[in-house]
Image (cartoon, helix red, strand yellow):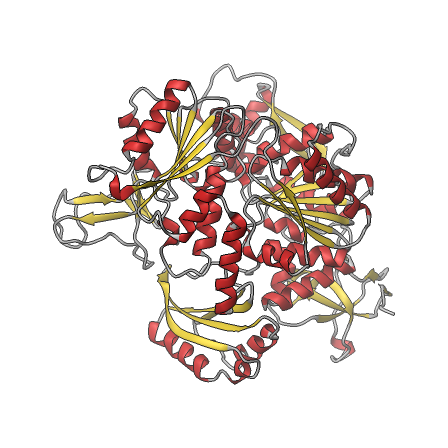
């Protein structure tokens, strides 16, 4: 029997958030402690956070073992959470201390309960408005009634705390005494259900029954865009609430949360807890603590919400499950979709993977009988799926430096005359992807990365989309010093905005790109305005493909449908298919029928033909057959190893040594490819070399990789990142 309580002086094993590679022994404090307790322990001269992981090892002189300093006043970590972190660490080959850091990302965890001053929007405007006061009001309005601490509000507004206190005296800001953390209001499963169609009701009944069973299972909820998948899985959330358990809904983009929170409130009468980078530190702390106490029924969040300390998790919904943003590409490398399944399996919870264009991994798991499949085949109400067509750009008369074909232009003109909206889609942020010197041919690159800098005319700067570095737009070529010969090459969404505005000078043209907004909430407000009819033509990146509903939008024009088909990524065809179908799905979501036009120079390409024909099953079957023949995911296993360092020769030498000493991998029948320069061979001044490991589906890959990597000691600034099931190959 596993020991659950330790008396004072007994040895306990404490896992800390420090990179020590092992659990440390401490003596239980006065009053003892439970397994899973969050504790503060001494390490050298410091106090650090840890969790009582179990009994101590006892392999150290007891007289020298130090005591736990205090037990934090938060709910202990449950055993299923410990199991999840351990299994996730083993799967992703991540040190356990890094997994614990993911699970303890709440500020002020150790603070004692009590009250503190919080600040909200007041009831009156200041009689004299200054720039600083306006900044405070802007922050408060932007966050829609959320509370801030004094320090938090002042920092976010970029003002001194005296400005905020002065506004309290004027009544423009309200100062309140509030409990440090309050329970979230209870959501009512019977509050506001909508009338469902026959196939929605049938799907909802299946999900509700699965949730009520209290057992693990995964369901792929597939439905064309606009078919009402959200209403169906919200019925599963209702069943979870009736069972007295907690539900988590994962969304791929913060920009989607505002609209989604409104839907939750309309369905259940209250707003749920939020967990993502757009909420305040105060709210993060409250969410973490209340989830652990069972005082948050539903959490809506980004991928890291998987690591919250749920008291009784009964349902995880992964909305737009195919979305690549569910893969964490730095730090701990994990896929939230896969981790959701792992988390649910240990909690006796159900998983719903919702998408109009599922990932091939989920499709294959359905085919193998691991997942159940529910399908919604028609759009809700009078809406029908848009008509899809390809525009063969080889036969279009298009002047140089222009990208909107005459055929697409005519279709857009027709929508303007009807008072309907058009969407012009181009998956390139900024103004132009390349800035070229017409005198010497030099392309302006990032100083620290092997990547071209992208012009952002709105910001009047060049930006590196790899490391985020920016610099002013030069007037002189940095290579040949000739003036006024720098030229923008190729289109980004900002340049498309210019072209479309010139073609339709009287139209209201809006460019939707994450670069153009100061905050997620400002972007949400603008999207709501567009949905209400505040634009005639929307120019957008993939941001617009994700879950937004524009009722007046009846035409989608894709500028470069071939863009995603280039390159050697094994998922290129799948991603192009998904993105094009998702973008097309923005059209015709109300009464007026929609149309999607794809500009392409390869209309005979198998992927373009499949998109236009709408024959999804044929596409998936063909794509699955190709992947199976090649032995790549989801029908084989892959791992990407990226080595990096300041000295390119040292990095290559390590890669070469790893490729030669591969006995541990050969024993399981795995192959090593490389070393080779990574496609982006330098980021932030660090040289990058890639190796790829490929193995059979059933091979014990993690164990072999761990044994293989352990042979090599990383000296100096050399770093190794192992990515199980890589999603990108940059």
Q: In the depicted view, which residue is nearer to us: 60 or 534?
A: 534
User: In this view of the protein, can residue 42 be seen by the observer?
Assistant: no
Is residue 271 depicted above or below 347 in this figure?
above
Image coordinates for residue 73, horizontal then vertical, percent: 77, 50
Number of labels in the image equals 0
Is residue 680 depicted above or below 251 in this figure?
below
Please state if 349 lies on the left or on the right of 706 as rendered.
Answer: right
User: In this view of the protein, can residue 173 be seen by the observer?
Assistant: yes
Q: In the depicted view, which residue is nearer to us: 92 or 713?
A: 92
At a point 51% along the width and 69% down the height, the residue shown is 631
Q: Quadrant of the N terminus?
A: bottom right
Q: In the depicted view, which residue is nearer to us: 273 or 634?
A: 634
Determine the image quadrant of residue 684: bottom left
Image coordinates for residue 176, horizontal then vertical, percent: 68, 28
Q: Quadrant of the C terminus?
A: bottom left
Q: In the depicted view, which residue is nearer to us: 553 or 607?
A: 607
Please state if 304 lies on the left or on the right of 468 as rendered.
Answer: right
Determine the image quadrant of residue 143: top right
Is residue 724 depicted above or below 706 in this figure?
above
Determine the image quadrant of residue 334: bottom right
Image coordinates for residue 121, horizontal then vertical, percent: 59, 24
Image coordinates for residue 294, horizontal then vertical, percent: 78, 44
Q: What residue occupies the far top of the structure in this picture?
A: 127
């Amino acid at each position: 029997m596993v020991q659950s309580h330790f008396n004072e002086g007994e040895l306990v094993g404490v896992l800390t958030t420090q990179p020590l590679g092992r659990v440390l022994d401490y003596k239980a404090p006065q009053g003892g402690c439970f397994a899973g307790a969050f504790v503060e322990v001494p390490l050298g001269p410091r106090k650090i956070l840890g969790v009582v992981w179990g009994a101590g090892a006892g392999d150290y002189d007891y007289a020298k073992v130090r005591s736990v300093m205090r037990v934090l006043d938060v709910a202990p970590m449950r055993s299923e959470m410990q199991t999840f972190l351990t299994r996730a660490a083993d799967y992703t080959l991540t040190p356990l201390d890094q997994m614990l850091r993911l699970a303890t990302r709440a500020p002020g965890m150790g603070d004692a309960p009590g009250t503190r001053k919080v600040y909200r929007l007041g009831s009156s405007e200041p009689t004299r408005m200054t720039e600083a006061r306006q900044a405070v009001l802007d922050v408060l309005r932007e966050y829609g009634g959320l509370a801030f601490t004094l320090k938090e509000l002042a920092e976010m507004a970029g003002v001194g705390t005296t400005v905020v206190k002065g506004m309290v005296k004027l009544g423009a800001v309200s100062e309140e005494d509030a409990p440090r953390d309050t329970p979230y209001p209870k959501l009512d499963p019977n509050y506001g259900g909508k009338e469902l169609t026959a196939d929605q009701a049938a799907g909802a009944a299946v999900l509700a029954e699965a949730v009520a069973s209290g057992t693990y299972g995964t369901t792929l909820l597939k439905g064309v865009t606009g078919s009402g998948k959200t209403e169906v899985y919200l019925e599963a959330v209702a069943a979870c609430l009736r069972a007295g358990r907690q539900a988590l809904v994962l969304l791929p983009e913060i920009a989607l949360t505002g609209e989604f929170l409104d839907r939750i409130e309309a369905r259940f009468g209250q707003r749920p807890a939020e967990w993502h980078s757009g909420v305040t530190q105060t709210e993060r702390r409250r969410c973490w603590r209340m989830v652990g106490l069972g005082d948050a029924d539903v959490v809506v969040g980004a991928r890291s919400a998987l690591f919250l300390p749920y008291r009784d998790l009964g349902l995880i919904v992964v909305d737009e499950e195919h979305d690549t943003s569910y893969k964490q590409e730095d730090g701990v490398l994990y896929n939230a979709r896969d981790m959701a399944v792992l988390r649910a399996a240990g909690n006796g919870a159900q998983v719903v993977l919702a998408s109009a264009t599922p990932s091939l991994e989920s499709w294959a798991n359905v085919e193998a009988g691991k997942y159940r499949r529910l399908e919604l085949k028609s759009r809700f109400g009078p809406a029908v799926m848009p008509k899809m067509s390809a525009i063969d750009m080889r036969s279009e008369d298009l002047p140089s430096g222009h990208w909107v074909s005459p055929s697409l232009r005519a279709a857009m003109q027709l929508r303007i005359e009807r008072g309907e909206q058009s969407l012009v889609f181009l998956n390139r942020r900024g103004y132009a992807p390349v800035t070229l010197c017409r005198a010497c041919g030099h392309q302006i690159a990032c100083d620290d990365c092997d990547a071209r800098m992208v012009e952002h005319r709105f910001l009047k700067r060049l930006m590196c989309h790899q490391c985020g570095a920016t610099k002013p737009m030069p007037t002189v070529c940095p290579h040949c010093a000739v003036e006024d010969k720098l030229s923008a090459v190729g289109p980004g969404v900002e340049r498309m905005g210019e072209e479309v505005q010139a073609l339709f000078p009287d139209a209201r043209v809006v460019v939707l790109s994450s670069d153009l907004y100061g905050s997620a909430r400002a972007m949400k407000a603008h999207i709501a305005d567009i949905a209400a009819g505040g634009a005639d033509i929307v120019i957008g990146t993939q941001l617009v493909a994700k879950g937004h509903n524009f009722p007046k939008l009846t035409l989608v024009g894709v500028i470069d449908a071939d863009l995603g088909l280039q390159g050697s990524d094994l998922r290129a065809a799948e991603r192009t298919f998904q993105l094009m179908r998702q973008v097309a799905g923005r059209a015709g979501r109300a009464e007026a029928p929609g149309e999607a036009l794809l500009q392409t120079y390869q209309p005979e390409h198998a992927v373009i033909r499949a998109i236009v024909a709408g024959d999804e099953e044929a596409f998936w079957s063909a794509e699955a057959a190709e992947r199976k023949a090649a032995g790549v995911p989801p029908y084989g296993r892959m791992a990407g190893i990226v080595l990096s360092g300041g000295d390119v020769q040292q990095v290559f030498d390590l890669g070469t040594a790893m490729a030669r000493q591969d006995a541990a991998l050969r024993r399981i029948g795995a192959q090593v490819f490389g070393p080779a320069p990574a496609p982006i061979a330098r980021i932030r001044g660090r040289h990058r070399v890639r190796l790829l490991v490929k193995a059979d589906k059933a091979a014990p890959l993690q164990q072999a990789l761990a044994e293989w990597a352990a042979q090599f000691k990383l000296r100096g600034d050399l770093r190794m990142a192992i990515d199980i099931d890589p999603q990108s190959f940059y």
